[in-house]
Image (tube, rainbow, N blue to C red):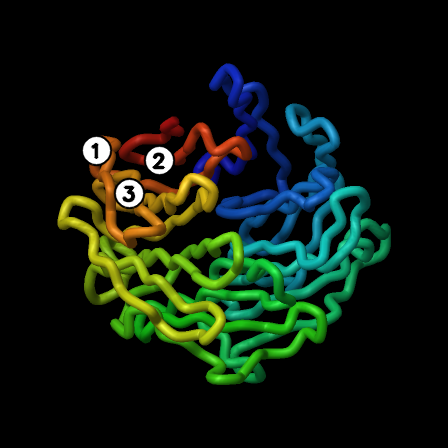
Amino acid sequence: SQVSNAIVVIDTSTNEVVRRVKHADMVKPAGGRFHPSLKRYYAGGSGKITIWDTPDPSHPPYLRTVAPAAGSAGEYRGFLIHRGSRTAIGGTVWTASIQDSKVYVYRALDLESAATPTPVKVFDAAGAGISVPHFVMSRPGTSEVWLTNRPVNGKGFLMRFDGDAHTVITTPTARLETASTVGDEPNELSFSSNGQLAYVGHHGHVITGSPSNEMNVAVVDAARFTLKKLYPMIATATTPGYVDIDPGGGRVYFATKWSPNLVVFDIKTERVLRYIDLGGFGPGYGVALTPDKKRVYLPLGAPAQSAVAE
């Protein structure tokens, strides 16, 4: 929760808030991610990353703080654990600083050390062409790491990295524009289970500073790194920026930020099956399926809602 500077833990069997945890170093925690082992949670924030001990996720104690760029107030939002084991803490932790236009890569084990950790790689605007990075995701069945870039005054784009070699993938191109509109702000994405398609939501406008509302979701041919098609949303479902997927059920779920809706998209027919209006002006700030794919949770932000819809 950005406004309350807290992690809120919800028991999905009862839909009750069972814990709220805070730390002075966790300021505006807009994003975060569990390690695949479920032993750690890496929480984003302004200027610093906090790490939480999560063998018991209902009671996560604070572990330590990492400041990738000393003195920076940039927000760390996108997180990814590449090659992480389900049994032990390992792999690399990727985190994106949206204001600083940098992506930091750490060894997960280095983040466990008492010493100040040093990133094994830093991608930036000058060397890699990054511009306002936001969300990081692994492409299934590959070593590829995908990044959304959402400049307010430019056309948003996707980038890919070799997660093992820590290099930018440039073939057939280093950048792929998703909607080719200034201020479209590609925000989150999800992959099909075979990694052949990517579904990309957009965040642009309605008080974000971008010049126009972006109403489309993009389907990308991930193998060819080309845009397959744009799908427009209805006028009352504005800026569909957040994505989660149920490949087995054949559905992609988008959450629209303004006039918040849950959009149910059919994978096979590639059409919207349903819009579920959540009421109010907004903003909707995410969408997450439970592992059994039976429930969807959508955080609704301040000041209009300050709630979680299920």
- Residue sitting at 60 percent across and 74 percent down? 123
Given contact means CB atoms under 8 Å apart, are the residues at marks 2 and 1 in contact? Answer: yes
Which of the marked residues, 1 or 3, is nearer the chain's N terminus? 3
Q: Secondary structure at mark 3?
A: strand
Tell me which amino acid carries mark 1. Gly
Tell me which amino acid carries mark 2. Leu
Tell me: 129 left or right of 234.
Answer: right
- Residue sitting at 25 percent across and 32 percent down? 278
Residue 199 percent coordinates (x, y):
39, 57
- Residue sitting at 40 percent across and 29 percent down? 308
- The answer for how far apart the CA atoms under marks 1 and 3 are is 16 Å
Q: Secondary structure at mark 2?
A: strand
- Between residues 94 and 29, which one lies in front from this camera angle? 94
Badge 1 is on which residue? Answer: 280
Which of the marked residues, 2 or 3, is nearer the chain's N terminus? 3
State whether residue 199 is above or below residue 154: above
Badge 2 is on which residue? Answer: 300
- Between residues 128 and 268, which one lies in front from this camera angle? 268
Q: Secondary structure at mark 1?
A: loop
Residue 67, visible in the rendered structure: no
Badge 3 is on which residue? Answer: 263
Given contact means CB atoms under 8 Å apart, are the residues at marks 1 and 3 in contact? Answer: no
Query: What residue occupies the far right of the structure in this picture?
Result: 114
Tell me: 117 left or right of 21.
Answer: right
Residue 104 percent coordinates (x, y):
64, 65
- Between residues 145 and 107, which one lies in front from this camera angle? 145
Tell me which amino acid carries mark 3. Val
Picture quarter with the C terminus: top left
